[in-house]
Amino acid sequence: MPNFHVGETVVHWNYGLGEVIKMDVQFIHDREMLCYVVKIHELTIWVAADDPNISSLRKPTPENQFTDLFAILKSDSEPLPQDRFDRKAYLTERMKDGRLASICRVIRDLISFGHEKKLNDNDKTTLERAERMLVNEWEFSLSVPRTQAHAEMMSLLKPA
């Protein structure tokens, strides 16, 4: 039974905030599968709905959980691996779980790392993606303009 319904806003772990626009049956690996068709900006993706335990979709973070996320952004950073390949693997793994708390930690730690060392292209791309995902969900869940969400995020990240 599907966990999400047509018209519902969802978050994909890799692409961010979108809307379930329909349910569809697709043949994947010679198997018929029920899929959510999700529209994320200009992108349309099909996500298997048959096994909700391994879904790459989740509901947006509720407004009342943002206080915990703000605390993560304000907290002391955790050190990132110095080796760029190790750092890329570490950050990719953290982003994969798709939870906003993990995304906040990635943002906080990359911002802090960037104060000590210059961010490489992968670091910058990861940071931009994480910030975009956080700000989009912040805007949706707290019903604030994107510019306000971004400004508030940046003020939380400033060292005390």
Image: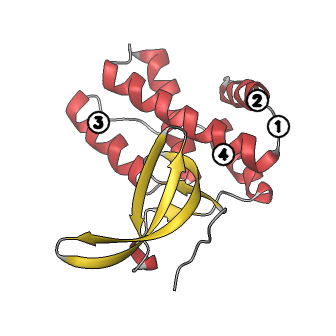
The x, y position of residue 119, in whole percent, is 38, 18
Query: What is the number of the mark on residue 144?
Result: 1
In percent of the image, x 51 and y 25: which residue is there?
Answer: 112
Mark 4 lies on residue: 137
Q: Give the mark nearest the N terminus, 1 or 2.
A: 1
158, 120: nearer the viewer: 120
Please, is residue 132 above or below residue 61 in the view?
above
Mark 2 lies on residue: 152
Q: Are marks 1 and 2 in contact (CB under 8 Å)?
A: yes
Query: What is the number of the mark on residue 88?
Result: 3
**Marks 2 and 4, how far apart in space?**
13 Å
Query: What is the number of the mark on residue 43?
Result: none
Q: Are marks 3 and 4 in contact (CB under 8 Å)?
A: no
The x, y position of residue 127, in whole percent, is 47, 29
In percent of the image, x 33 and y 19: which residue is there?
Answer: 121
**Marks 3 and 1, how far apart in space?**
32 Å
In percent of the image, x 75 and y 50: which residue is there?
Answer: 141
Q: Dividing the picture into quarters, in which one does residue 6 lie?
A: bottom right
Tell me the amino acid under the disc marked 1.
Val
**Marks 3 and 2, how far apart in space?**
27 Å
